[in-house]
Image: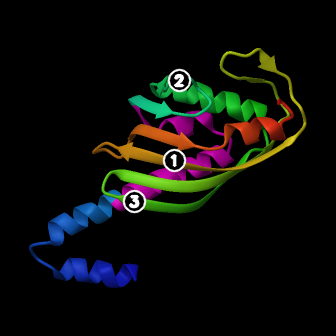
Amino acid sequence: MFIRRFITTLLTTQSHDEEGRDQAMAMDGRQTLEAQSRAINAHDGPTFASYYADDAVVVDPQYPEPLRGRAAIEQDVTTFLRAFPDLEFSLTSMLVDDRMVAAEGKIVGTHNGPIQLPGAEEIPATGRRLEFPMAFFSRLDESGKIIEERRYYDLASQQEQLGLT
């Protein structure tokens, strides 16, 4: 399917530029998410955060206010990886359309390190296993960096699995 579309694109004259550009953006968005997945599974917070623009905004149900800027995003992922040192993320589906990426995934890990939740004291390791699906929508700039992301997951279920409720 991909090869057929690629050959058709090469043979088309007028629509070649537009379709080729769309296809390149789709590949960029797909490549960005796949690279982020590899970084998270390698427990490399700085590389994970490097795919965000300097002034990126991330809306996450865990926080009352959006995360603003790459540094805040890197701090967030570093904190999460410290709390779940065996964390694994699997990307289960993805849809790329121009500069928008929608994806689903699953996070699995064991709470073996402390974690600081917004508005709460630091929570020591519970040793409990956490598994939850999530979805997120990312908007990319012209260079392929994420400028805005919205994450969706069941925070109540996550806290219940950790024995916090």
Q: CA distance from mark 3 to mark 1?
A: 12 Å
Q: Quadrant of residue 105?
A: bottom right
> Which region is colored magenta?
26-53
Q: CA distance from mark 2 to mark 1?
A: 18 Å
Give the amino acid at mark 2. Ala
Up the image or down, 153 lies above or below 2; here it is above
* Circle 3 residue: 96
Q: From the image, give the main secondary structure of the stretch colored magenta.
A: helix
- Mark found first going from the N terminus, 2 or 3: 2
- Mark found first going from the N terminus, 3 or 1: 3
Give the amino acid at mark 1. Phe
Question: Residue reaching furthest left?
Answer: 14
SS of the residue at dot 2? helix
Marks 2 and 3 in Cβ contact (< 8 Å): no
Q: Is residue 93 left or right of residue 154?
A: left
Query: Measured from the top left, where is residue 12 in percent x and y?
Result: 15, 79
Q: Please, which colouring scheme is shown?
A: rainbow
Q: Is residue 145 left or right of residue 127?
A: left
Up the image or down, 113 lies above or below 41; here it is above
Q: Reply yes or no: does residue 119 show up in magenta.
A: no
* Circle 1 residue: 136
- Say whether residue 51 is visible: no
Q: Is residue 67 left or right of residue 25?
A: right
Tell me which residue sits at (56%, 23%) in the image: 64
Q: Which mark is residue 72?
A: 2
The label nearer to you, 3 versus 1, is 1
Q: Image quadrant for the N terminus? A: bottom left
The label nearer to you, 2 versus 1, is 1
Tell me which residue sits at (82%, 30%) in the image: 165
